[in-house]
Image (cartoon, grey):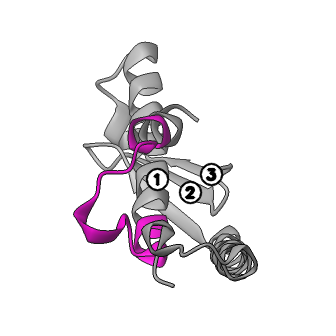
């Protein structure tokens, strides 16, 4: 069997295939959870690190790079760095899973992208 369209009525085989998919996904998510990814703002003055689950684990701010920014500018730089780190996480997940098959668009892509950006 090679996908949902290939189902020929063998429910047990379909369930075994789904079990295989979910086990593979669980292994991939476990692997990803152990990784750490980074992102920076456009200036490189702020660097954020996130876990493979998207949790912020570190934030480095180069004071020299932020001299010309007010408090709002610093906040935007931090948000940009965190978003870049979470985007790297999304890219890594796509790399590990191979992305959508046959060039199909992922129906959840917009939602996942929003979560990766906004947390």
The x and y percentages for residue 69 are 34, 22
Tag 2 residue: 49
Tag 3 residue: 54
Q: Is residue 70 shown in magenta?
A: no
Principal SS element in the magenta part? Answer: helix
Q: Secondary structure at mark 1?
A: helix
Location of residue 92 by image quarter:
bottom left
Q: Give the extent of the magenta segment.
A: 92-112
Location of residue 34 by image quarter:
bottom right
Distance between the alpha carbons at the discs numbered 3 and 1: 8 Å
Tag 1 residue: 85
Looking at the image, residue 85 sits to the left or right of residue 99; the answer is: right
The x and y percentages for residue 76 are 40, 25
Q: Nearer the viewer, mark 3 or mark 1?
A: 3
Q: Compared to 40, does 76 lie above or below?
A: above
The x and y percentages for residue 108 are 46, 42
**Which badge, 3 or 1, comes first in the chain's sequence?**
3
Q: Residues within 10 Å of mark 3 (few under 14, many from 20)?
A: many
Label 1–label 2 contact, CB within 8 A: yes
Q: Is residue 95 shown in magenta?
A: yes
Q: Quadrant of the C terminus?
A: top right
Residue drawn at x 49%, y 59% as measured from the top left: 89
Q: Nearer the viewer, mark 1 or mark 2?
A: 1
Label 3–label 1 contact, CB within 8 A: no
């Amino acid at each position: 069997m090679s996908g949902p369209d290939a189902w020929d009525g063998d429910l047990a085989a379909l369930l075994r295939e789904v079990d295989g998919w979910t086990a593979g996904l669980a292994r991939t998510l476990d692997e990803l959870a152990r990784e750490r990814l980074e992102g920076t703002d456009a200036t490189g003055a702020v660097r954020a690190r996130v876990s493979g689950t998207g949790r912020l684990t570190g934030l480095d701010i180069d004071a020299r790079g932020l001299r010309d920014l007010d408090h709002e500018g610093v906040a935007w730089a931090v948000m940009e760095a965190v978003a870049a780190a979470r985007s790297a996480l999304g890219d890594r997940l796509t790399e590990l899973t191979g992305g959508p098959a046959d060039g199909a668009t992922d129906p959840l892509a917009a939602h996942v992208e929003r979560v990766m950006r906004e947390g």
